[in-house]
Amino acid sequence: MEPDFSPLAEFLGDEFDGYLISADGSDSNQLYLSGFDAPDPYVTLYTPEGIHLLVSTLEFGRAKKESRADTVSRLSDYDYRDNHAEHGSVVGKAKTVAAFLADHDVASLAVPADFPLGTADALRDEGVAVEAEVDDVLTNIRAVKTDEEVEHIHAAQDANEAAMRAAESLIRDADVADDGTLTDEGEPLTSERVREEIEVTLLRHGCALDETIVACGADAADPHDRGSGPLRADEPVIIDIFPRDKETKYNGDMTRTFVKGEPSPEIREWFDLTEEAFEAALDAVEPGVTGKDVHDAVCDVYEAAGENTLRADPAAETGFIHSTGHGVGLDVHELPSLSPSGEELRPGHVITIEPGLYDPDVGGVRIEDLVVVTEDGYENLTEYPVELLVE
């Protein structure tokens, strides 16, 4: 199932002839629009009549086979080497692109807000009208996933669950030293060792990741602290894994909080309360509600129990100090947002639900699942159990 680019055509209207991206495949909008991944920058032109690529000779054959483009052209078709030699990289590339645009009857362009300024100016010097759009048109299109995209995300989440299982097993099987440190085969069990096990497991499942969170005790009180050093019994360990499938480029995202031993009364209370907030958020998810509505459901639970939130105190440094969730797709953080500014949820939105509580004097607790909004509610793409104690 191909994405529906009609909103992009509607955006162009009578004002623009086309929409152009010049970036490599690590740019998610480029990857999405072109259906092609390359390590070096290439040009994708969208017009209501079709999608057209301009690539190096090196990528020409692969682009013809793998991309969703209606036509694929080479830089050499437009004298790029001579233009580069005579005018330099920026102006030479602009002259080449301008000739490519002329072949597709494009004289006016909308481009992403982060389109290179030098390239835009050089294209204008070639007589092409260029205007940056700030409506996040493609990002909003990407937010509504096709069935195939949901399958890709689900597969990444399955790999995620295998990695979480490997991490939990390390903690479960660990011994407890006299000083409370967890040990593995006589050596301290560290955040770094658990992350290594997560990464190896993900590689075996066709996924990779740049970072993951294995944070224990006070480290867990900072939602984005990656964690370091030995893990300890009786203290919460937050594990947040967000892998990317190496073939499809789609992400998963999941968080669990574990305690090996006996959690403090505060952590036990926080976990139960966070699980209640988590369920309240899930109950709120359906088409037509906003991300703000879902976020408010979490804040209602926490505030009723006397816990601080950013909704109640925008300067809060402890309590519930982040949004309830975000979209997941080609980026691990994308639209829609489950926050005070969260937009209306639509079928096909894939979102995280991740309430949590944090205080350096206590530690931290977070629970996160990945769900897809459906016509009548949601489907949870996560099957991993929600349990605090590792026994």
Image: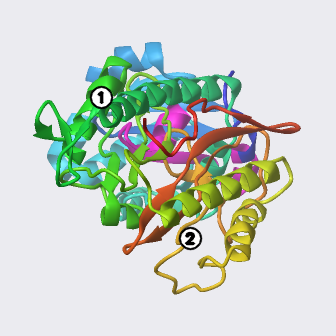
Taking depth in this image into account, of 78 and 114 the one nearest to the observer is 114
Q: Measured from the top left, where is residue 280 in percent x and y? A: 76, 55
Q: Quadrant of residue 83?
A: top left
Colouring style:
rainbow
Q: Calculate the distance from the C-alpha at mark 2 to the C-alpha at mark 1.
A: 49 Å
Report if residue 32 lies within the magenta region: yes
Amino acid residing under circle 2:
Phe
Q: Measured from the top left, where is residue 177 in percent x and y? A: 18, 46
Taking depth in this image into account, of 298 and 332 the one nearest to the observer is 298
Report if residue 339 lies within the magenta region: no
The residue beneath circle 2 is: 320
**Quarter containing the C terminus:** top left
Residue extent of the magenta highlight: 8-36
Q: Tell me what residue is drawn at x 21 percent, y 54 percent.
A: 228
For residue 56, which numbered disc appears in the image? Answer: 1
Q: Residues within 10 Å of mark 2 (few under 14, many from 20)?
A: many
Q: Measured along the vertical axis of the image, is residue 344 above or below residue 192?
A: below
Decide if residue 120 is in sight here: yes
Task: Determine the secondary structure under disc 2.
Answer: loop
Q: Tell me what residue is drawn at x 42 percent, y 28 percent.
A: 165
Q: Measured from the top left, where is residue 252 in percent x and y? A: 50, 36
